């Protein structure tokens, strides 16, 4: 843990100075004042703990009122249901579209793989036939040579 640059007393003095100037004391204003005076802001938890101590235990212990949320009207409920239905319809449409796209791509991939296998087979067959042709041509040349020698 680092040693503290600011003492609690320095923070309390800064709070008193802000109050004396007639300003509303907030954590942000206090931290900015401390940064300007001492080059250190004092740490968020520590600043707010000291502010709570100085504001008194009664103020810190007061329960905060819950925000008042008006009950939803029938119109807003119907609008929310309509938006939810539209969002669900949109989601289903997207899922169907991407399912079709995925299926089409899988079909194209299968066709491409089959075409690649067909090309390999054709290349092997061409190589076999080329060898057979070369063998046949060599045999023809040998037989022609024999005929010329006899003839």
Image (tube, helix red, strand yellow):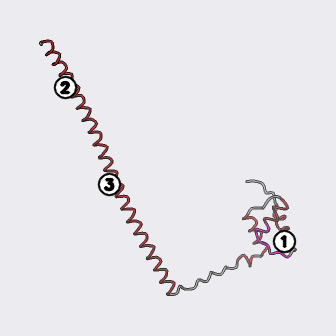
User: What is the crowding at mark 1: few (fewer than 14 residues within 10 Å), some, or many (at least 20)?
Assistant: some
Q: Nearer the viewer, mark 3 or mark 1?
A: 3
Q: Nearer the viewer, mark 2 or mark 1?
A: 2
- Badge 2 element: helix
121 up-or-down from 24: above or below: above
- Badge 1 element: helix
Query: Where residue 60 appears, x then y in whole percent?
Result: 72, 75
Residue 136 is labelled as 2
> In which quarter of the view is residue 129 placed?
top left
Location of the C terminus (image quadrant): top left
Observer-nearest residue: 83 or 69?
83
Q: Is residue 102 left or right of residue 43?
A: left
Q: CA distance from mark 2 to mark 3?
A: 43 Å
**Residue labelled with disc 1:** 18
**Residue labelled with disc 3:** 107
Query: Where residue 147 appears, x then y in whole percent?
Result: 13, 16
N-terminal label among 2 and 3: 3
Is the C-beta separation of discs 2 and 3 under 8 Å?
A: no
Query: Where residue 53 appears, x then y in whole percent?
Result: 77, 72
> In which quarter of the view is residue 8 placed?
bottom right
């Amino acid at each position: 843990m680092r040693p503290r640059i600011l003492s609690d007393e320095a923070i309390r003095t800064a709070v008193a100075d802000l109050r004396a100037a007639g300003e509303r004391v907030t954590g942000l204003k206090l931290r900015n004042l401390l940064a300007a005076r001492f080059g250190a802001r004092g740490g968020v938890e520590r600043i707010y703990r000291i502010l709570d101590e100085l504001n008194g235990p009664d103020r810190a212990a007061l329960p905060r009122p819950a925000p008042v949320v008006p009950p939803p009207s029938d119109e807003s409920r119907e609008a929310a249901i309509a938006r939810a239905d539209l969002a669900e319809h949109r989601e289903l449409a997207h899922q169907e579209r991407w399912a079709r796209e995925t299926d089409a791509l899988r079909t194209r991939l299968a066709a491409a793989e089959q075409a690649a296998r067909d090309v390999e087979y054709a290349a092997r067959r061409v190589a076999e036939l080329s060898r057979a042709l070369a063998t046949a041509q060599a045999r023809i040349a040998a037989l022609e040579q024999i005929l010329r020698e006899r003839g």
